[in-house]
Amino acid sequence: MSIAIILVIVLTIIAIISTIMAISKGDPNYRSSAKRNTTNLTLIYAATTVLSIIALGFYIWIK
């Protein structure tokens, strides 16, 4: 069980780092809408994290 928790945490950290790296380079027009895009990505990560924790809790509760 602890391996699954560690895997979720590691994958989340990798996703956040990858997103930050993608924000720093790429489309020149991306900078003009960076605040909106960053806000959207933050909301997506927050929702994914909450849903992952709920799913993990449900799995532990069933087991």
Image (cartoon, rainbow, N blue to C red):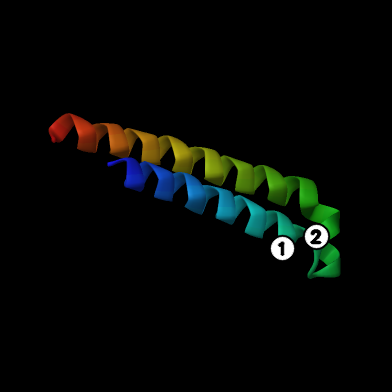
Instruction: Look at the image and tell me in which quarter the N terminus lies.
Output: top left
Kindly identify the residue that appears in the image at 28 percent across and 32 percent down: 57
In the rendered structure, the answer to whether residue 61 lies left or right of residue 16 reads left
Classify mark 2: helix, strand or loop. Answer: helix
Kindly identify the residue that appears in the image at 30 percent across and 38 percent down: 56
Question: Which kind of residue does numbered mark 2 sit on?
Answer: Ser
Q: Quadrant of residue 59?
A: top left
Is residue 26 placed above or below 62 in the rendered structure?
A: below
Is residue 23 placed above or below 46 in the rendered structure?
A: below
Given residues 47 and 53, the one toward you in this image is 53
Please provide percent x and percent y for residue 7: 41, 50
Given residues 7 and 21, the one toward you in this image is 7
Instruction: Kindly give the residue lying farthest to the front in the view shown.
Output: 2
Name the residue tied to disc 1: 22
Question: Which kind of residue does numbered mark 1 sit on?
Answer: Ala
Asked if the residues shown at circle 2 and circle 1 are in contact, with their CB atoms under 8 angstroms apart, the answer is: yes
Name the residue tied to disc 2: 24
Please provide percent x and percent y for residue 49: 46, 40
In the rendered structure, the answer to whether residue 55 lies left or right of residue 46 reads left
Kindly report the distance in space between the C-alpha atoms of the residues bearing marks 2 and 1: 5 Å
Instruction: Look at the image and tell me in which quarter the C terminus lies.
Output: top left
Instruction: Kindly give the residue lying farthest to the left in the view shown.
Output: 63
Is residue 31 placed above or below 27 in the rendered structure?
A: above
Please provide percent x and percent y for residue 62: 14, 34
